[in-house]
Image: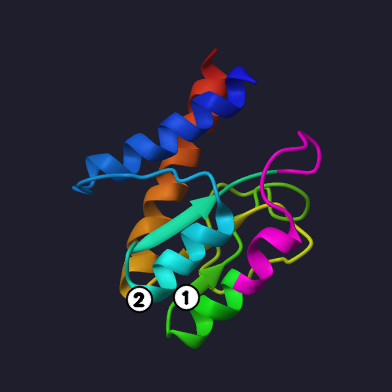
Amino acid sequence: DSSGVRKFCDIQSEILLRGVRNIRVLGSTGLNMAYVACGRLDAAFEEGSWKSNRGPKIWDFAAGMLLIEEAGGKTHDISSEGANTNPIVDLNSPIDLMGRSFFCASTSELACKVLDAISHGRSKWEDSMINS
């Protein structure tokens, strides 16, 4: 839907505006997470929802979560539905394996920076939805 595309673009643009050189969308949650675990990518995330029937499912990211954590990386829940409707991402929130969203990063420092960009991108999207 157009709202989801706008949200995706707002979050991606916020990340790029912070000096990220490139964003890759591989289309495979498991592969994204495996690449972060082995150092080919620095971070990965995907938002989804059961309501809109989009985003990864448990079998897409459960094994990736283990790979990331065993490699010393960080995983977080970035769901923006249900109890967590706040656009600000909780840095202490573990991945909800029954949810449809995930975030992972190679280091805690990078996780904080990218999660902050995601939060600002969500806020920008929410502002645009209110003003339209």
Position in image of residue 1 (x %, y %): 65, 21
Mark 1: which amino acid?
Answer: Lys
Label 2, on which residue?
Answer: 107
Question: In the shown orientation, is residue 55 left or right of residue 106?
Answer: right
Whether the magenta-drawn stretch holds residue 118 is answered as no
Position in image of residue 38 (x %, y %): 38, 75
Q: Residue at x 59, y 73 (%)?
A: 65
Label 2: few (<14), some (14–19) or many (≥20) C-alpha neighbours in 10 Å: some
Q: Residue at x 71, y 38 (%)?
A: 54
On the question of residue 93 being in view, the answer is no
Q: Is residue 18 above or below residue 110?
A: above
Disc 1 secondary structure class: strand
Question: In the shown orientation, is residue 109 left or right of residue 33?
Answer: left
Disc 2 secondary structure class: loop
Q: Residue at x 61, y 49 (%)?
A: 86
Whether the magenta-drawn stretch holds residue 56 is answered as yes
Q: Examine the image and state in which quarter residue 84 appears.
A: bottom right
Position in image of residue 53 (x %, y %): 77, 37
Instruction: Give the magenta range.
Output: 49-63
Quadrant, the C terminus? top right
Label 1, on which residue?
Answer: 74
Q: Main secondary structure of the magenta part?
A: loop
